[in-house]
Amino acid sequence: MSEPIKTDVVIIGAGPIGLFAVFELGLLDMKAHLIDILDKIGGQCAELYPEKPIYDIPGIPYTSAQGLVDSLLQQIKPFSAQYHLNEMVDTVEKIGDPLFRVKTDQGKEFISKIVVIAAGGGSFQPKRPPIPGIEPYEGKSVFYAVRKMEAFRHKRILVVGGGDSALDWTLNLAPLAKHLTLLHRRSEFRAAPDSVNKMMALVGEGKIDLVLGQVTSLAGTDGQIGHAVVKTNDGSSFDIACDVMLPFFGLTMKLGPVANWGFDLKNNELIPVDTASFETSVPGIFAIGDINWYPGKLKLILSGFHEAALMAQRAHHYVYPDKRLVFQYTTSSTSLQKKLGVAPARG
């Protein structure tokens, strides 16, 4: 076991609201580590709709979802936040007043003074393909995410899906695999055209196989796949030998382990908060963004930004209980401008 990571703040969720929380906390000299179940920064903005247009960010008439994430990353760069991706927070345990032990499903442990839940609607969970009897194979030879590419070296890999994740991992794993087959139910793909072109080039060179159809069943013993039975679009069936199957059928939102952390939930899916600070019923744990609830709540990014600002003011009292907080503006405070790495305004 590695030593616990000690920090001022653990932020659960690396979407736009979690990222802006880094900014507000950083202005007040609080360091943050962010944990996200996805393999990239940006939450659902980056994962589900990176090209979605956004028109209601104050002062920015138009940006894309990914463009907003990129701008936030640039804005918080001075604060050197640390990111832990492909990890889901399993437990949050109160061990002080306030002090928390946060553990992830990858065995990582954090000790933090406060916890900020900025997980949107919860955690992203992979959609399970409709294959009877798939459960015994999950986690042994059926995987919904690639955490370590090296684990797939010299394997016969079956990638199932037609979106960006399926194509990206097809391209990344092809050089490592003993053999790789990409299976999709139709010839049209939902992935970036460049990725599709690169995939088709590998097919043309005989380096991977492309099959149109659907997996109807799996065969193997003790959780280890031997082959997948595939039904093609013309109604015929045949076997594809494989050691590993990687289904990429998209993601769905679930509250996940948050539901077991001792909150009195609203409608079993939202965390009630105090609107003065967006603190939950557990002192030292805050909830900002779409995952919280209060009278009049609007599920807007700009609302989450406001919540992050007030959260940071209250968090400062926990992190620096003996330090007086003086409210300052970035436009006029030379100390804040110094933290941001910008020259003080003159004249």
Image (tube, grey):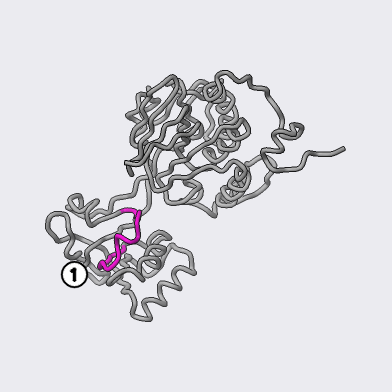
Rendered location of residue 165, percent (x, y): 40, 59
Does residue 301 show up magenta in the picture? no
Q: In which quarter of the image is the N terminus?
A: top left
At x 32%, y 72%, the residue is 210
At x 48%, y 64%, the residue is 192
At x 20%, y 69%, the residue is 241
Rendered location of residue 317, percent (x, y): 56, 21
Q: In which quarter of the image is residue 79?
A: top right
Q: Quadrant of residue 334?
A: top right
Rendered location of residue 119, percent (x, y): 45, 37
> Residue placed farthest to the bottom in the image?
205
Q: Give the range drawn in magenta.
A: 144-159
* Residue 46 vs residue 328, the one in the foreground: 328
Bin the neighbour count of mark 1 within 10 Å (Cα to Cα): few under 14, some 14-19, many 20 and up: some
Q: Is residue 323 left or right of residue 287?
A: right
* Residue 130 vs residue 17, the one in the foreground: 17
Q: Mark 1 points at which residue?
A: 239
